[in-house]
Amino acid sequence: MSRSKSSSLVLGGVTLFLAAVLLFTGCSRTPLTADEPTVDQPQVLTRSAAFAASLVPGQLYTEAVVSSADGGRLVLYDVLLEVPPGAVANDTLFSINIPDVNSFYNEFGTSGLVFDVPVKVTMSYRGADLSNINESTIRIGYYDEATGEWDDLVCEVDFVNKLVTAELSHFSAYGLISD
């Protein structure tokens, strides 16, 4: 075989190999390149083991009918909902559910309910495990199922009493989150 045919075969083999590598691995850049910043999702605060152990498993849900004319309050452990008069058009069932004793994640219902006047929620993070948490980043957020991300609310934080307060325009799943 001539030297030119041999070189052509080697070059063709190398080209075929590189084409196969590109086909199987793709030619796009890696999604975590240094020039593209990554945005970390906030994390739901976790309860300290001692605080989580103090929650009674059968008592992680409460509900009450709230008067449209008078408003009302609903409390469950470290969560307070304050419903002002006129927030809903009719007397309505409100609920708080803590689905996991280990996290500051709450489901408020009636799910999807939209308010005519904002409802105030206050959550305490006194029993939180604050190791590796920058306390100044703690806030209330709601989980947007459509985007799969946490949306922040405008909050007031009382660092002395470890309370976070926000106004809600609707019910869904809310949690204390931090970066």
Image (cartoon, helix red, strand yellow):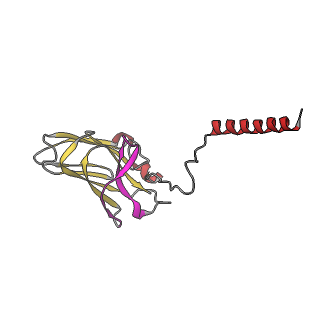
Q: Is residue 151 magenta-colored?
A: yes
**Residue in the image at 25% along x and 39% along y:** 110
The stretch of residues the image draws in magenta is: 135-159
Instruction: Work out which residue is located at the far bottom of the displayed protein and give it.
Output: 160
Residue 105 is situated, as x and y percent measured from the top left of the image, at 38, 47
Q: Residue 148: name its quadrant.
A: top left
**Which image quarter holds the C terminus?**
bottom left
Is 175 or 37 nearer to us in this picture?
37
**Which image quarter holds the N terminus?**
top right
Q: Is residue 6 magenta-colored?
A: no
Instruction: Tell whether 45 sits left or right of 8.
Output: left
**Residue in the image at 32% along x and 63% along y:** 157
**Residue in the image at 33% along x and 60% along y:** 163
Is 50 or 19 nearer to us in this picture?
19
Is 26 or 61 nearer to us in this picture?
26
Instruction: Work out which residue is located at the far top of the displayed protein and give it.
Output: 1
Q: Residue 59: name its quadrant.
A: top left
Instruction: Tell whether 108 sits left or right of 128.
Output: left
Residue 170 is situated, as x and y percent measured from the top left of the image, at 25, 45
**Residue in the image at 56% along x and 51% along y:** 32
